[in-house]
Amino acid sequence: MQIETYLLAEHGWVPNNAKLPVILYRQAMTPASREEAAAAFEARFQQHGWPAQWRDGIYDYHHYHSTAHEVLGVAAGSATLMIGGPDGREIEVIAGDALLLPTGTGHCACRSSDDFLVVGGYPEGQAWDIRCDAPTPEDRRRMLDLPFPAIDPVAGLEGPLSQHWVSSAHL
Protein backbone atom coordinates (compact mmCIF):
# COMPACT_ATOMS: atom_id res chain seq x y z
CA MET A 1 0.00 0.00 0.00
CA GLN A 2 1.28 3.47 -0.92
CA ILE A 3 0.21 6.58 1.00
CA GLU A 4 -0.28 10.09 -0.39
CA THR A 5 -1.33 13.07 1.73
CA TYR A 6 -2.75 16.45 0.77
CA LEU A 7 -3.13 19.34 3.19
CA LEU A 8 -5.75 21.67 1.72
CA ALA A 9 -6.27 25.32 2.66
CA GLU A 10 -9.67 26.98 2.54
CA HIS A 11 -10.74 27.54 -1.06
CA GLY A 12 -13.65 29.84 -1.88
CA TRP A 13 -16.77 28.61 -0.07
CA VAL A 14 -15.17 25.23 0.73
CA PRO A 15 -13.54 25.24 4.20
CA ASN A 16 -11.32 22.16 3.70
CA ASN A 17 -9.19 21.32 6.73
CA ALA A 18 -5.97 23.23 7.31
CA LYS A 19 -4.84 20.91 10.14
CA LEU A 20 -5.80 17.40 9.03
CA PRO A 21 -4.60 16.17 5.62
CA VAL A 22 -6.52 14.05 3.16
CA ILE A 23 -4.97 10.57 3.11
CA LEU A 24 -5.05 8.55 -0.11
CA TYR A 25 -4.27 4.84 0.26
CA ARG A 26 -3.15 3.44 -3.10
CA GLN A 27 -3.79 -0.31 -3.43
CA ALA A 28 -5.33 -0.54 0.06
CA MET A 29 -6.95 -3.77 -1.06
CA THR A 30 -6.37 -6.24 -3.83
CA PRO A 31 -9.28 -5.80 -6.22
CA ALA A 32 -11.66 -8.76 -6.27
CA SER A 33 -15.13 -9.03 -7.68
CA ARG A 34 -17.26 -5.93 -7.18
CA GLU A 35 -19.32 -7.55 -4.42
CA GLU A 36 -16.32 -9.11 -2.63
CA ALA A 37 -14.39 -5.83 -2.67
CA ALA A 38 -17.34 -3.85 -1.31
CA ALA A 39 -17.90 -6.41 1.46
CA ALA A 40 -14.18 -6.41 2.31
CA PHE A 41 -14.09 -2.60 2.64
CA GLU A 42 -17.24 -2.71 4.79
CA ALA A 43 -15.72 -5.35 7.07
CA ARG A 44 -12.41 -3.50 7.40
CA PHE A 45 -14.08 -0.16 8.14
CA GLN A 46 -16.37 -1.79 10.72
CA GLN A 47 -13.43 -3.57 12.38
CA HIS A 48 -11.68 -0.22 12.84
CA GLY A 49 -14.69 1.71 14.19
CA TRP A 50 -15.73 3.41 10.95
CA PRO A 51 -18.94 1.55 9.99
CA ALA A 52 -19.91 1.72 6.32
CA GLN A 53 -23.20 3.48 5.70
CA TRP A 54 -23.62 3.28 1.94
CA ARG A 55 -22.53 1.84 -1.41
CA ASP A 56 -22.82 4.08 -4.46
CA GLY A 57 -20.79 6.51 -6.56
CA ILE A 58 -19.57 9.94 -5.46
CA TYR A 59 -21.74 12.97 -6.16
CA ASP A 60 -20.81 14.92 -9.27
CA TYR A 61 -21.17 18.25 -7.50
CA HIS A 62 -18.83 19.89 -5.00
CA HIS A 63 -19.76 19.27 -1.38
CA TYR A 64 -18.26 18.69 2.04
CA HIS A 65 -19.33 17.27 5.39
CA SER A 66 -19.36 19.54 8.44
CA THR A 67 -20.40 16.90 10.98
CA ALA A 68 -18.18 13.91 10.18
CA HIS A 69 -14.91 12.66 8.79
CA GLU A 70 -15.37 10.26 5.85
CA VAL A 71 -13.58 7.21 4.46
CA LEU A 72 -14.23 6.07 0.89
CA GLY A 73 -13.23 2.63 -0.40
CA VAL A 74 -13.21 2.17 -4.18
CA ALA A 75 -14.68 -1.31 -4.66
CA ALA A 76 -14.89 -1.25 -8.47
CA GLY A 77 -14.10 0.89 -11.48
CA SER A 78 -12.19 4.14 -11.62
CA ALA A 79 -12.81 7.87 -11.36
CA THR A 80 -11.27 11.29 -11.50
CA LEU A 81 -12.12 13.10 -8.28
CA MET A 82 -11.60 16.72 -7.40
CA ILE A 83 -10.74 17.40 -3.78
CA GLY A 84 -10.58 20.84 -2.23
CA GLY A 85 -13.56 22.41 -4.01
CA PRO A 86 -13.95 24.02 -7.44
CA ASP A 87 -10.57 24.27 -9.19
CA GLY A 88 -9.09 22.01 -6.50
CA ARG A 89 -6.76 19.04 -6.94
CA GLU A 90 -7.74 16.29 -9.39
CA ILE A 91 -6.82 12.76 -8.36
CA GLU A 92 -7.35 9.45 -10.11
CA VAL A 93 -8.66 6.52 -8.07
CA ILE A 94 -9.08 2.88 -9.07
CA ALA A 95 -10.53 -0.26 -7.53
CA GLY A 96 -8.65 -1.08 -4.35
CA ASP A 97 -7.84 2.55 -3.42
CA ALA A 98 -9.26 4.28 -0.34
CA LEU A 99 -9.52 7.95 0.59
CA LEU A 100 -9.80 9.50 4.05
CA LEU A 101 -11.39 12.96 4.05
CA PRO A 102 -11.28 15.08 7.19
CA THR A 103 -14.35 17.14 7.97
CA GLY A 104 -14.70 20.19 5.70
CA THR A 105 -12.87 18.66 2.73
CA GLY A 106 -14.55 19.50 -0.57
CA HIS A 107 -14.93 16.63 -3.02
CA CYS A 108 -16.82 15.50 -6.12
CA ALA A 109 -16.50 13.08 -9.02
CA CYS A 110 -15.50 14.72 -12.29
CA ARG A 111 -15.64 11.50 -14.31
CA SER A 112 -16.21 7.86 -13.44
CA SER A 113 -16.40 4.53 -15.20
CA ASP A 114 -19.80 2.88 -15.58
CA ASP A 115 -18.88 0.26 -12.97
CA PHE A 116 -17.56 2.75 -10.37
CA LEU A 117 -18.61 1.67 -6.87
CA VAL A 118 -17.59 3.22 -3.55
CA VAL A 119 -18.21 2.21 0.06
CA GLY A 120 -18.60 5.19 2.41
CA GLY A 121 -17.95 5.02 6.15
CA TYR A 122 -17.85 7.40 9.10
CA PRO A 123 -16.50 7.17 12.65
CA GLU A 124 -18.89 5.71 15.17
CA GLY A 125 -21.01 8.48 16.66
CA GLN A 126 -20.59 10.88 13.72
CA ALA A 127 -23.61 11.47 11.46
CA TRP A 128 -22.77 12.96 8.06
CA ASP A 129 -24.41 15.91 6.38
CA ILE A 130 -23.99 17.37 2.89
CA ARG A 131 -22.98 21.01 2.55
CA CYS A 132 -22.78 22.98 -0.68
CA ASP A 133 -22.38 26.45 0.81
CA ALA A 134 -19.97 28.40 2.97
CA PRO A 135 -19.81 27.30 6.58
CA THR A 136 -21.39 29.41 9.28
CA PRO A 137 -19.39 30.37 12.39
CA GLU A 138 -21.22 27.53 14.20
CA ASP A 139 -20.20 25.07 11.46
CA ARG A 140 -16.57 26.16 11.78
CA ARG A 141 -16.61 25.64 15.57
CA ARG A 142 -18.18 22.21 15.16
CA MET A 143 -15.58 21.16 12.57
CA LEU A 144 -12.70 22.37 14.76
CA ASP A 145 -14.07 20.52 17.78
CA LEU A 146 -14.98 17.31 15.93
CA PRO A 147 -13.03 14.47 17.53
CA PHE A 148 -10.93 12.28 15.31
CA PRO A 149 -10.72 8.55 15.93
CA ALA A 150 -7.52 6.96 17.15
CA ILE A 151 -7.82 4.03 14.74
CA ASP A 152 -7.10 4.35 11.03
CA PRO A 153 -10.16 3.09 9.09
CA VAL A 154 -8.06 1.34 6.45
CA ALA A 155 -4.87 0.16 8.16
CA GLY A 156 -5.84 -0.07 11.84
CA LEU A 157 -3.68 1.01 14.77
CA GLU A 158 -0.47 1.17 12.75
CA GLY A 159 -2.01 3.14 9.89
CA PRO A 160 -1.05 6.60 8.65
CA LEU A 161 -3.91 8.30 10.51
CA SER A 162 -1.96 8.01 13.76
CA GLN A 163 1.06 9.66 12.14
CA HIS A 164 -0.62 12.36 10.04
CA TRP A 165 -3.74 13.25 12.00
CA VAL A 166 -2.53 13.00 15.59
CA SER A 167 0.63 15.00 14.94
CA SER A 168 -1.26 17.51 12.75
CA ALA A 169 -3.97 18.13 15.33
CA HIS A 170 -1.47 19.52 17.82
CA LEU A 171 -0.03 22.22 15.55
Image (cartoon, helix red, strand yellow):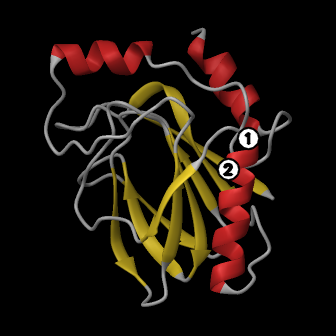
User: Which quarter of the rendering shows the C terminus?
Assistant: top right
Q: Amino acid at mark 1?
A: His
x then y, percent, for residue 68 = 43, 34
- Amino acid residing under circle 2: Phe
Does residue 146 lie above or below 90 as drawn?
above
Q: How far separated are the C-alphas under marks 1 and 2?
A: 5 Å
Residue 38 at what x, y percent from top left? Answer: 63, 71
Is 108 situated left or right of 22 in this image?
Answer: left
Q: Tag 1: Cα neighbours inside 10 Å, few (<14), some, or many (≥20)?
A: some
Specify whether residue 96 is in view.
no
| Number of marks in the rendered image | 2
117 up-or-down from 59: above or below: below
From the top left corner, tell me how far across and down residue 80 is, in percent.
43, 72
Instruction: Say which residue appears at 70% left-offset and 87% top-offset.
Output: 33
| Residue of label 2 | 45
Asked if residue 12 lies left or right of residue 71, the reply is: left
Residue occupying the point 15% across, 21% down: 136
Q: Choose top left, top right, bottom left or bottom right for residue 98.
A: bottom right
Q: Which residue is mark 1?
A: 48
